[in-house]
């Protein structure tokens, strides 16, 4: 099944800026988040597609590659894969390597050193909004591969050593003439290692690594947001036969909160208040994300929808000592389940109300009368 265009998936134009893409992603991620759609497999699949699209479009280099080559830029063959499954070792990159390999001799040695490099690993970690505010040290258990202890990562049976590859003579690359061009490719005999193993280790079958879960501690700084990526160098899968390991990428998602809605560093909260408090005024207390309480003095005659700004009561700002603001929107609650006495008091209030107690409704119905007269 053909993949949907990433721009269409997020509902943005191809020339959209980073802020517009981020805003569209947040809206869709909130809509299709698994916590908001329990048991809905279609929503879960949509959520994964949205994350894949945002992972590419938020990165300038990945986005440039996608704009030029489409999904083919990330659909290469086997090899080290980046976060989200993107393949950075195959595809169109090999075309340039083959065409210009003869002119880039200095790079070939570096490529031999990277041959068999371990794959990068992606790990999704969900945290609460409070944890995103405070930061935390999380312990994660990541399925991965580690160096074989029996052969010390060499891939050779203890007591034996790898030998020079007879196909490439230890270069890790082989050349073949094709018309006017000389094409250089990875050696099929040794996979670019430059060495082959005649007596492979029985524990790892000659790969130099074994499957094993890794338990790691991850420092999550205060102020992280949905989609924040934390890179742990050399904590990915171990490389083949002693080659360098890949990296581990921790992708964070922030669980929706029961009270607060987040927009960047600002928080938004809706607070219901009794009709009497709205009419007479008075203080109310609002919970804050830091665990404390914030006081708001409600003026007499406050209407539903009135918004108050509490400076410095929002989220932590990443890599900064500052904080955003909290916005509280009041919603006046109409009394229900009135007692007989309460009903009598309201009826008396209605009779004694006269003009001026409800200027908006009186003004509206005055306009309605004028409308019907006309």
Image: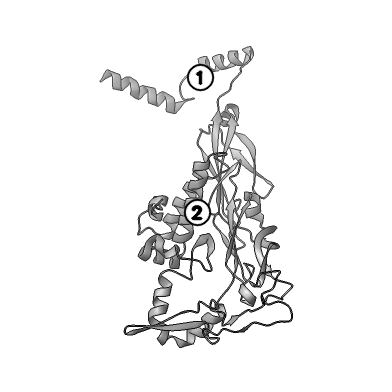
Q: How far across and down, in percent of the image, does residue 75 sit?
A: 44, 62
Numbered disc 2: secondary structure: helix
Q: Looking at the image, which is closer to me, 357 or 80?
A: 80
Q: Looking at the image, which is closer to me, 200 or 175?
A: 200
Q: Which residue is mark 2?
A: 51
In the rendered picture of this protein, how many numbered marks are placed on residues? 2
**As displayed, is residue 153 above or below residue 52?**
below
Q: How far across and down, in percent of the image, does residue 323 sit?
A: 59, 56
For the C terminus, the image quarter is top left
Q: Which residue is mark 1?
A: 353
Q: Is residue 207 left or right of residue 59?
A: right
Earlier residue among tags 2 and 1 = 2
Numbered disc 1: secondary structure: loop
Q: Is residue 122 left or right of residue 28?
A: right
Asked whether residue 68 is in view, the answer is yes
**As displayed, is residue 335 above or below residue 317?**
above
Q: Residues within 10 Å of mark 1 (few under 14, many from 20)?
A: few
Q: Is residue 304 left or right of residue 236?
A: left
Q: What residue appears at the point 46 percent right and 64 percent down from the top-left corner?
A: 59
Q: What residue appears at the point 61 percent right and 51 percent down from the top-left corner?
A: 313
Q: Residue furthest left?
A: 374
Q: What residue appears at the point 42 percent right and 73 percent down from the top-left corner?
A: 93
Q: Residue furthest front?
A: 198
Distance between mark 2 and mark 1 Cα atoms: 56 Å
């Amino acid at each position: 099944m053909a993949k949907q265009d990433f721009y269409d998936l997020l509902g943005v134009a191809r020339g959209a800026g980073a802020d517009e893409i981020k805003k569209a992603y947040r809206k869709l991620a909130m809509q299709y988040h698994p916590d908001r759609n329990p048991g809905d497999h279609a929503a879960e699949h949509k959520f994964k597609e949205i994350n894949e699209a945002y992972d590419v479009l938020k990165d300038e280099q990945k986005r440039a590659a996608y704009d030029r080559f489409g999904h083919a830029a990330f659909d290469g063959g086997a090899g080290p894969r980046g976060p989200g499954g993107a393949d950075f070792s195959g595809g169109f990159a090999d075309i340039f390597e083959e065409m210009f390999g003869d002119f880039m001799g200095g790079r070939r040695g570096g490529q031999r050193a990277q041959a068999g490099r371990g794959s990068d690993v992606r790990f999704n970690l969900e945290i609460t909004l409070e944890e995103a505010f405070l930061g935390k040290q999380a312990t994660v258990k990541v399925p991965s591969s580690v160096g074989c202890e029996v052969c010390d990562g060499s891939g050779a049976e203890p007591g034996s050593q790898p030998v020079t590859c007879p196909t490439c003579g230890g270069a890790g690359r082989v050349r073949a003439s094709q018309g006017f061009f000389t094409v250089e490719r990875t050696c099929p005999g040794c996979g670019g290692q430059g060495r082959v193993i005649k007596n492979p280790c029985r524990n790892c079958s000659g790969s130099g690594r074994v499957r094993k879960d890794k338990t790691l501690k991850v420092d999550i700084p205060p102020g992280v947001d949905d989609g924040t990526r934390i890179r742990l160098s050399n904590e990915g899968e171990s490389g083949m036969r002693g080659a360098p390991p890949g990296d581990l990428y921790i992708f964070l998602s922030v669980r929706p909160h029961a009270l607060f809605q987040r927009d960047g560093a600002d928080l938004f909260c809706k607070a219901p208040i009794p009709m009497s408090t709205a009419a007479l005024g008075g203080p109310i207390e609002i919970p804050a994300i830091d665990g404390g309480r914030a006081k708001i003095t409600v003026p007499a005659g406050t209407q539903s929808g009135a918004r108050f700004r509490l400076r410095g009561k929002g989220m932590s700002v990443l890599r900064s000592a500052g904080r955003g603001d909290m916005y509280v929107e009041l919603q006046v609650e109409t009394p229900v389940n009135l007692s007989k006495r309460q009903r009598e008091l309201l009826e008396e209030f209605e009779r004694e109300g006269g003009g001026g107690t409800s200027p908006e409704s009186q003004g509206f119905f005055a306009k309605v009368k004028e409308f019907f007269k006309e």
